[in-house]
Image: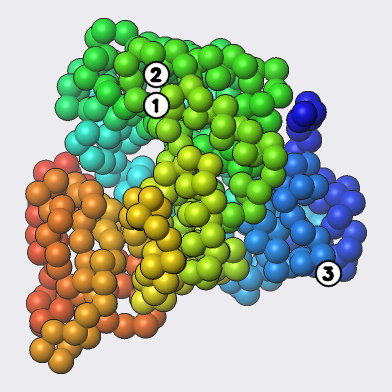
Amino acid sequence: MIEERKMRFYGLKDIDKIPQLQKLSATERFEIKVTAHVLPFRTNNYLVEDLINWDNVPNDPIYQLTFMQKDMLSDEHFNTMADAIKKELPNEEIKKIANQIRYELNPHPAGQMTANVPKLDDEPVQGVQHKYKETCLVFPSSGQTCHAYCTFCFRWAQFVGMNDLKFATDESNRFQTYLKNNNQITDVLFTGGDPMVMTLEKLKIYIEPLLQPEFDHIQNIRIGTKSIAYWPYKYVTDKDADGVIKFFEKIVKSGKHLAIMGHYNHWVELSTEVSQEAVRRIRNTGAEIRTQSPLVKHVNDSAEIWARMWKEQVKYGCIPYYFFVERDTGAKRYFAIPLSEAFEIFRGAYIKVSGLARTVKGPSMSALPGKVTVDGITEINGEKLFVLNFLQGRNPEWCKRPFFAKYDETSTWLDQLTPAFNEKKFFFEDELDKIFHEDHIELAEVF
């Protein structure tokens, strides 16, 4: 029987209070603090006590996922912050320095704050992103935190206390009016942060209205969450656990498809009894769990890890969904892996699993024009090339039209690639420029 457990959070101020960190030197603990003054740091007792192998620190993958490392910042940024802390500058001055660094880390890649925000009555709909015709993202204001922060997170800017970088709904529920008025939207993804940090009552406020007849065009409700990996007690023994399960059942019985988009970065996150029980209880409601993760150096950068993770997920009834490329933001310099290597890791894992795990798509870049995959590496007329494809595009007509880029071993993102066959542009670039021109947005604003 799984016993009830109370969550304890550890933040920047608690680093010296975590017993396990006493194994580290004073210098190593100081490096964690310096980096955590810039990038958001939060972990909890479940990760610290159950998931991290402290005999393998600093190489343990969950340790790398949650505890800051010096090299996550450039030497210049690290030294600037370290000097400020050593000089014991006032908190406001330290915060100002941190904010200056944050703005240099591309806090909102791929046009999230400018290119993806829809309008209602000529006014932006706060906390909503609508990049693809059928799918709309909603950022509940009460869900803009997590049970623990992943060090690689591309939405790290949500958590650093800078309101101009934060993305969240207002309290007017204008997002519901927007959804009601757009019949082409079939999928709503609640994301964050993590919607599953909300109480059951808060969760119902956002989702229950969508079960009414005026939202019949919405067929699929998705919840993007790391909670199954980072705090599975949410579904097993927490005060709201039984209520959450019953609410999931209600959503499914209403005729909606409920997809829990489970963020798993390593197979160890599915290795505990409570995490497996959480999966079982969720799936028994009729909801599906689809799993996704970026490829992250120091965490899951081998085909063996991915193959084992996908096999474990299928074993417990989860559906492997996305193998992402780490986005060009935050600590990407520490975590990024060249596209050439990313494809080989993906392929190496893919050939080790059965068809049930080959539902996974990737390596996928969620870039400005859409979700672009590296489908292969080939040679045409003596020229080595990347074979690329759109899984999703700002124009749906771009999807499944193979295109080619020159092969190289250093590029980590779409905008670093060069079109093949001496072409000056990729086939979609002129139309992309036109889309933004019509919306009065300069492309330079969103890169």
- Farthest residue to the bottom: give it: 382
Which is more N-terminal, label 2 or label 1? Answer: 2
Which is more N-terminal, label 3 or label 1? Answer: 3
Q: Classify 144 as above or below 11.
A: above
Which image quadrant for residue 433? bottom left
- Residue under label 2, please give it: 252
Q: Residue at x 59, y 54 (%)?
A: 267
Q: Residue at x 85, y 57 (%)?
A: 21
x%, y% of residue 174? 34, 17
x%, y% of residue 106? 44, 57
Q: Quadrant of the N terminus?
A: top right
CA–CA distance in space, label 1 to label 2 = 6 Å
x%, y% of residue 343? 36, 71
Disc 3 vs disc 2: Cβ atoms closer than 8 Å?
Answer: no
CA–CA distance in space, label 1 to label 3 = 47 Å
Q: Classify 54 as above or below 44.
A: below
- Badge 1: how crowded within 10 Å, few (<14), some, or many (20+)? many
Please say whether residue 239 is visible from this viewpoint.
Answer: yes
Relative side of 213 to 196, left or right: left
Nearer the observer: mark 3 or 2; the answer is: 2
- Residue under label 3, please give it: 27
Which is more N-terminal, label 2 or label 3? Answer: 3
Frontmost residue, 160 versus 137:
137
Frontmost residue, 203 versus 118:
203
Disc 1 vs disc 2: Cβ atoms closer than 8 Å?
Answer: yes
Relative side of 162 to 272, left or right: left
Amino acid residing under circle 3: Thr
Q: Residue at x 35, y 62 (%)?
A: 363
What kind of element bears circle 2?
helix
Q: Residue at x 28, y 66 (%)?
A: 374
